Image (spheres, rainbow, N blue to C red):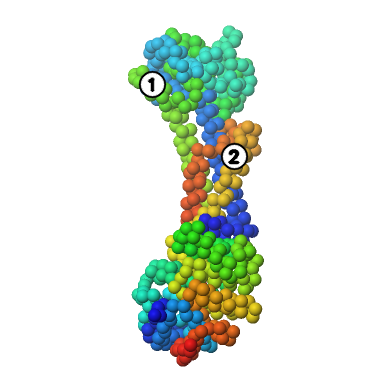
């Protein structure tokens, strides 16, 4: 009886109820849109980190990442790479020789991280080859080749084919330098990294550093993201004397950003729902005042306060939750559409997006994993919105309510 | 032997709106037996509605005692009074007071639903009463589509459906035209006879007074006459 009565009561004033249901739907839809957009942005950011920056996992000698000391190379790398090749969960890996150095040109100089790579291995793990804007990811000619980021090229006024000098310290602490010719200019979605990362031939770098075949980094790409934690533990267990980290610790700002964005989107959703709760409360208060006589009559006939409370609460819930399936359906359709088509946010400022490490084409993703929490928030909104109307109705005295 | 339904001893009620005390009921004694058809009459402000409210457990007297079917309702708390009203009293109001979003049948079974009666029992009772009041073809219609007289008949069915100890009707014919009023009175008299149901109604409608078997007259909160 309570449910039938509550459902019919909310349709007494159709226009008023429809306005509130539409408001809840719009508010929820806005919340779902924000969550979908943020989820898409974070998925894109995480993909950028995994595919072009770190891979899923990296292996280093302990202490190497702190100051890029070239003497801290990975020992027994052949054993490790053999084991990685045999691992069914690993899609590909690449070995890198890395050091810090200085790029000098007639127009200026800049501190850089120099990555010695093998282009074939590298293209299997990172998406660097796809980010080439000018030139190619290969070493050709007699002069040593180098790939630099677009931002660094702009900063040092460098163009494809031009030369620059790299200075670094070798494993014996000698200052060594060599000239490199720019064979490619890349542009990733992370502008700050484009300014500091330069890529040279692994062999060239090993020679300059006084290394033979030793490497400083093994970057691993897994077949799926889901195996990250399991593989991390497995490798940490297998190589306790090496530092094995996942992208979450290698790029802590991305991991933190993912958590912050989640919290931020919930805060936005809560603000929307708090604003809506005032509208719902107002509608319910008007409804109660209009039905004062009727509520007094029901109390006179023997309806107790618990049933009255349930009636008002159910009405508020109906008014609030009716919008949920509509918002979910529209949200799902819109998210699916944009997930396929993509949403071009370059209008918001390509440079700004890239400076935060985001692609400008975002593929929003329906936040199905968060819908449970969203529904819970909506239920809480209904509960909070029903408090004042419930108090108002429970305080009614049947005798005075029945008087005209 | 007569069964006492209501026994009111020396009840008084004074209201104090805006600091000026107004005595609505003054030292009233009243005794009503099972199956009576009683009219409470008197001019406006004589205390008819206040007396009905107190008998019906909607209002408390300042002094005195009201015993209904052996229960001292003046000693009951808020919760106890709600339960008492639900199981013992049928109310008929002047303004019909049907719930507009429920059909005639749903309105009629409202009290039985609150009492958690089984559907079969509800259906049987409602059908019987709707037949008796001639509204069988209107039971699935909402109140807005019924005439005033039909709405008041539904209100009477609602009051009687749960077989209360007695029915209190406050000016039941006030909003009805003559034909509807006579119809309603005929129906109430019939139910009073057939179900041995006690009816107490406040009125200053001469048509109602003429049909009553007992007329209690109130003036300034006091019973000035009680005629069979």
Q: Is residue B87 above or below residue A104?
A: below
Q: Are marks 2 and 1 in contact (CB under 8 Å)?
A: no
- The residue wearing badge 1 is A234
Residue at the spot 45% in from the left edge and 75% down from the top edge: B56
Disc number for residue B181: none
Location of the N terminus of chain B by quadrant is bottom left
Residue placed most toward the observer, B195 or A37: B195
Seen in the picture, residue A297 relative to B208 is either above or below; the reply is above
Question: What residue is shown at x 50% (from left), y 11% (from top)?
Answer: A204
Secondary structure beneath dot 2 equals helix
* Chain ID, mark 1: A
Q: Secondary structure at mark 1?
A: helix
Dot 2 crowding, Cα within 10 Å, few <14, some 14–19, many 20+: many
Q: Residues within 10 Å of mark 1 (few under 14, many from 20)?
A: few
Q: CA distance from mark 2 to mark 1?
A: 38 Å
Residue A275 versus residue B21: which sits nearer the camera?
A: B21
Q: Residue at x 59, y 84 (%)?
A: B207
Seen from the viewer's position, the closer of residues B141 and A111 is B141
Mark 2 against mark 1, which lies toward the viewer? 2
The image quarter containing residue A346 is top right
Give me the residue at 52% from left, 64% from top: B125
Q: Chain of mark 2?
A: A
Drawn side of residue B76 relative to residue A356, left or right:
left
Q: Looking at the picture, how far across and down is residue A150, in whole percent?
A: 59, 25
Label 2: which residue? A332
Q: Answer yes or no: is residue A33 visible.
A: yes
Residue A135, quarter of the rendered image? top right
């Amino acid at each position: 009886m309570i449910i039938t009565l509550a459902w019919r009561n909310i349709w007494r004033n159709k226009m008023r109820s429809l306005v509130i249901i539409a408001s809840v739907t719009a508010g929820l839809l806005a919340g779902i849109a924000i969550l979908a957009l943020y989820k898409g942005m974070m998925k894109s950011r995480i993909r950028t980190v995994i595919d072009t920056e770190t891979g899923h996992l990296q292996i280093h000698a302990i202490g190497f990442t702190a100051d890029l000391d070239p003497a801290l190379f990975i020992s027994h790398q052949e054993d490790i790479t053999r084991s990685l090749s045999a691992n069914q969960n690993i899609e590909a890996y690449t070995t890198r020789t890395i050091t810090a150095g200085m790029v000098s040109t007639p127009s200026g100089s800049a501190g850089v991280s120099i990555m010695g790579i093998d282009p074939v291995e590298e293209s299997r793990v990172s998406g660097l080859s796809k980010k080439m804007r000018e030139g190619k990811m290969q070493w050709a000619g007699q002069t040593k080749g180098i790939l630099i980021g677009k931002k660094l090229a702009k900063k040092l006024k460098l163009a494809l084919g031009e030369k620059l000098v790299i200075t670094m310290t070798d494993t014996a602490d000698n200052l060594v330098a060599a000239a490199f010719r720019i064979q490619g200019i890349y542009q990733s979605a992370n502008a700050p990294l484009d300014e500091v990362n330069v890529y040279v031939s692994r062999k060239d770098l090993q020679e300059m550093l006084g290394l033979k075949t030793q490497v400083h980094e093994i970057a691993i790409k897994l077949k799926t993201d889901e195996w990250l934690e399991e593989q991390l533990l497995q490798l940490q267990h297998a190589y306790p004397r090496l530092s094995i980290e996942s992208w979450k610790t290698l790029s802590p700002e991305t991991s933190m950003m993912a958590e912050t964005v989640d919290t931020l989107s919930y805060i936005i959703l809560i603000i929307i729902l708090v604003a809506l709760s005032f509208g719902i409360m107002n509608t319910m208060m008007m409804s109660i005042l209009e039905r004062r006589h009727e509520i007094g009559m029901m109390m006179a006939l023997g309806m107790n306060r618990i049933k009255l409370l349930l009636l008002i609460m159910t009405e508020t819930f109906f008014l609030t939750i009716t919008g949920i399936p509509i918002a979910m359906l529209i949200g799902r359709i819109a998210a699916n559409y944009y997930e396929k088509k993509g949403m071009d946010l370059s209008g918001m400022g390509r440079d700004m997006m890239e400076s935060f490490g985001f692609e400008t084409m975002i593929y929003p993703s329906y936040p199905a994993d968060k819908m449970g929490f969203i529904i819970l928030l909506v239920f809480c909104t209904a509960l909070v919105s029903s408090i004042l109307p419930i108090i108002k109705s429970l305080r009614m005295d049947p005798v005075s309510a029945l008087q005209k | 032997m007569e069964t006492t339904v209501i026994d009111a001893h020396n009840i008084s009620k004074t209201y104090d709106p805006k600091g000026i005390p107004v005595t609505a009921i003054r030292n009233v004694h009243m005794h009503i037996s099972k199956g009576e058809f009683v009219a409470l009459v008197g001019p406006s402000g004589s205390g008819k509605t206040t007396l009905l409210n107190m008998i019906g457990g909607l209002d408390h007297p300042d002094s005195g005692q009201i015993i209904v079917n052996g229960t001292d309702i003046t000693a009951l708390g808020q919760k106890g009074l709600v339960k008492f009203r639900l199981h013992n009293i049928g109310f008929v109001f002047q303004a019909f007071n049907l719930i507009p979003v429920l059909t005639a049948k749903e309105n009629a079974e409202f009290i039985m639903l609150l009492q958690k009666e089984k559907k079969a029992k509800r259906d049987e009772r409602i059908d019987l009463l709707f037949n008796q009041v001639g509204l069988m073809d209107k039971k699935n219609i909402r109140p807005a589509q019924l005439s005033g007289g039909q709405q008041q008949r539904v209100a009477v069915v609602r009051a009687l459906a749960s077989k209360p100890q007695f029915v209190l009707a406050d000016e039941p014919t006030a909003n009805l035209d003559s034909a509807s009023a006579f119809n309603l009175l005929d129906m109430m008299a019939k139910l009073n006879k057939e179900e041995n149901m006690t009816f107490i109604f406040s009125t200053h409608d001469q048509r109602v007074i003429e049909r009553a078997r007992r007329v209690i007259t109130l003036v300034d909160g006091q019973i000035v006459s009680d005629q069979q």
